[in-house]
Amino acid sequence: MQVPLLDLQLQYKKLKPKIIAEIETIADSQHFILGPKVESFERAICEYTGANHAIGVTSGTDALLVILMALGIGPGDAVVTTPYTFFATAGGIARVGAKPIFADIDPVTFNISVESLRATLEKHRDENIKAIMPVHLFGLSAAMDDIHELAAEFGVPVIEDAAQALGAVYLSQQGVKHCGAISEFGYYSFFPSKNLGAFGDAGMVVCRDEAMAVKMRALRNHGMENRYFHKMIGGNFRIDALQAAVLQIKLPHLDEWSGARQRNADFYRSEFAKAGLVGKLTMPAEGPSRDVLKFGHIYNQFVIRAPRRDELCAYLAKNQIGHAIYYPVPLHLQECFAYLGYREGDFPESERAARETIALPIFPELTREQQRYVVETIAAFYR
Ligand SMILES: Cc1ncc(COP(=O)(O)O)c(C=O)c1O
């Protein structure tokens, strides 16, 4: 049997007639950049997440750039984040000329550790820290109440990297909130492998403040508010109408798809338990409330810790089971960040996660038969 890490064909087949019709409408209109399709999708994201403002952009990476530019973060400034994330999180900080400062992760959730964040903020008190950027990694919310307390104490805004977490919900002291829309700023990626994936690259900024939203709308379009009058320097970060239209067709299905991922995760847990692998493998952490299907981890990735991880990868490949390592090198040890002066051992939990974790297939259409095969194959490897 073959089990791909992700199969987008199955989702596409179900929505194909609607999507093709929409693409045809846009082709007939020949209106490709921004416009009513984009505005309508931005409103839909505000309604879905509870965010005040949404600004469609070219990718998650560019969403972060736009936020940092709007905040005026640049050379001489620093932003604190986690080293165990996709490159773009810290890449964006460095690209505007600011310094990424890392804090280690919590070994259970893989998200930024509140204790490490506090220690880092204290240690770097003399630096110009301009924001804290937690990442809701793999679709599980970071500890946002604690992070907000620290942000208030140190007087900095919070930017949520919710690239992997559209649809994930956090049970905050103020009630249930959507990841990405809990803080002053947040952003989503619609890279095709995300729970809500575009037909190419696309992303979205969400924010609380209207003046900031106006500024970011201008920044995504070369800093232009009135045509050809530029008060500031922005870029071409405009989302395509085609992407917005495809994403709007998919959005009403997002909770159902995330629910299917959660059920697949539950099935893995019970099958791994039945196979006697619970002591050997470490399953992902649960979200804050598992009573309501929609709450908690939305499993953009199902990431476990596994002994002899690299040998297991080779064994899975031999048995035609898709898998991935997110991420093999934590960001403080990336060659391009050598100038930051970090060394191996600086963030032991991030380094351990990079050595021990592996992502297994979890996409919504995965069958029980395929999941059983994954579990049996892993059980055979450890026998
Ligand atoms: C955690 C995280 N941050 C940022 C990004 C960047 O998003 P994009 O690929 O849309 O530029 C991604 C996407 O892969 C991500 O997973």
Image: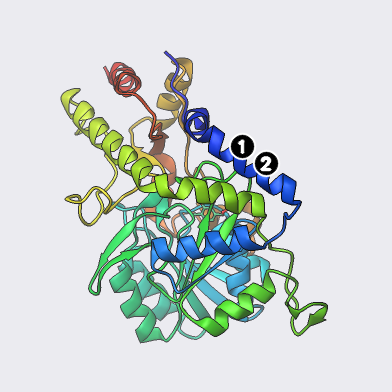
Which residue lies under the disc numbered 1?
20
Respond yes or no on whether mark 1 lies under 8 Å from ligand 1: no
Can you give x and y, in whole percent of width and height, for residue 381 in the image?
A: 33, 19
Can you give x and y, in whole percent of width and height, for residue 192 in the image?
A: 55, 42
53 or 329, nearer to the observer: 53
Instruction: Return the residue found at the far top.
Output: 1
Where's the N terminus, which quadrant?
top left
159 or 91, nearer to the observer: 159
Amino acid type of disc 1? Ile
Classify 107 as above or below 115.
Answer: above
191 or 256, nearer to the observer: 256
Labelled disc at residue 24: 2
Classify 303 as above or below 268.
Answer: below
Identify which residue is drawn at 39% across, 68% down.
50
Judging from the image, what secondary structure is the residue with disc 1 in? helix
Can you give x and y, in whole percent of width and height, for residue 224 in the image?
A: 74, 77
Classify 213 as above or below 314.
Answer: below
Could you say which quadrant of the image residue 113 lies in? bottom left
Amino acid type of disc 2? Glu
Where's the C terminus, which quadrant?
top left
Count residues near mark 2 (Cα–Cα under 10 Å), then give few for <14, some for 14-19, many for 20+: few
The answer to whether the residues at label 1 and label 2 have Cβ atoms under 8 Å apart is yes
Judging from the image, what secondary structure is the residue with disc 2 in? helix
